[in-house]
Amino acid sequence: MDNSIKVFRLISVLEAISFLVLLLIAMPLKYIWDMPEMVRIVGMAHGVLFVLYVIGAYWMYEKLNWSFKVLMIVVLCSILPLGPFYADNKYLPKN
């Protein structure tokens, strides 16, 4: 498998995990227990990973000759908590 696909797959998984940590751990800590520190840390990491994910999606669009529709689906998957896992499974080549 091409290294660029491996890199995008890694970014995709990290972006999805950071989003889940932000939603399920950091946000409750901030709003229920008044502990905002984790939101700052995880939020920054998630923001960087989100930008890398969108850039990587465009990179895959060109590399894998995706249609514009597939690119938009993959980018929209980034705003769903488990979306990057779906995009990885559906649109990236196996192995």
Image: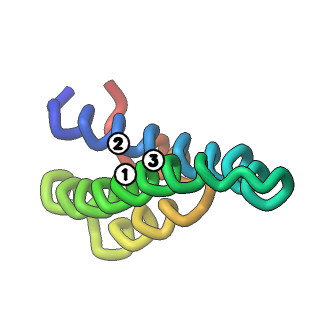
Write the residue at 35% across / 38% down. 9
Q: Which amino acid lies under the numbered mark 3 shown in the image of this protein?
A: Glu
Q: Which residue is mark 2?
A: 11
Please state which of the two labelled residues, at mark 2 or mark 1, is closer to the viewer.
1
Residue 27, how many percent across, how many down?
71, 56
For mark 1, give the secondary structure.
helix
Question: Horizontally, is 13 left or right of 48 in the view?
Answer: right
| On screen, residue 78 above or below 16 | below
- Type of residue at label 2? Ile
Q: What residue does disc 3 label?
A: 15
Q: Earlier in the sequence, mark 2 or mark 1?
A: 2
Q: Mark 2 and mark 3 in contact (Cβ < 8 Å)?
A: yes
Mark 2 neighbour density, 10 Å: few (under 14) some (14–19) many (20 or more): many
Q: Position of residue 48 (x, y in %)?
A: 34, 55
Say which mark, if any, is on residue 10: none
Instruction: Name the one closer to the observer, 64 or 50.
Output: 50
In the rendering, at what x and y percent does residue 82 appear?
Answer: 61, 50
Q: Between marks 2 and 1, how big is the CA–CA gap?
A: 7 Å
Label 3 to label 1: alpha-carbon separation: 5 Å
Q: In the rendered image, which quarter is residue 67 located in?
A: bottom left
Query: Residue at coordinates 78% horizontally, 53% vertically from top-left?
Result: 28
Residues under numbered marks 3 and 1 in contact, where contact means CB atoms less than 8 Å apart: yes
Say which quadrant the C terminus sits in. Answer: top left
Q: Secondary structure at mark 2?
A: helix
Foreground of the two, 78 or 30: 30
In the image, what residue occupies the spot 16% across and 31% down? Answer: 3
Q: Which residue is mark 1?
A: 49
> Foreground: 62 or 78?
78
- Is mark 2 in CB contact (under 8 Å) with mark 1? yes
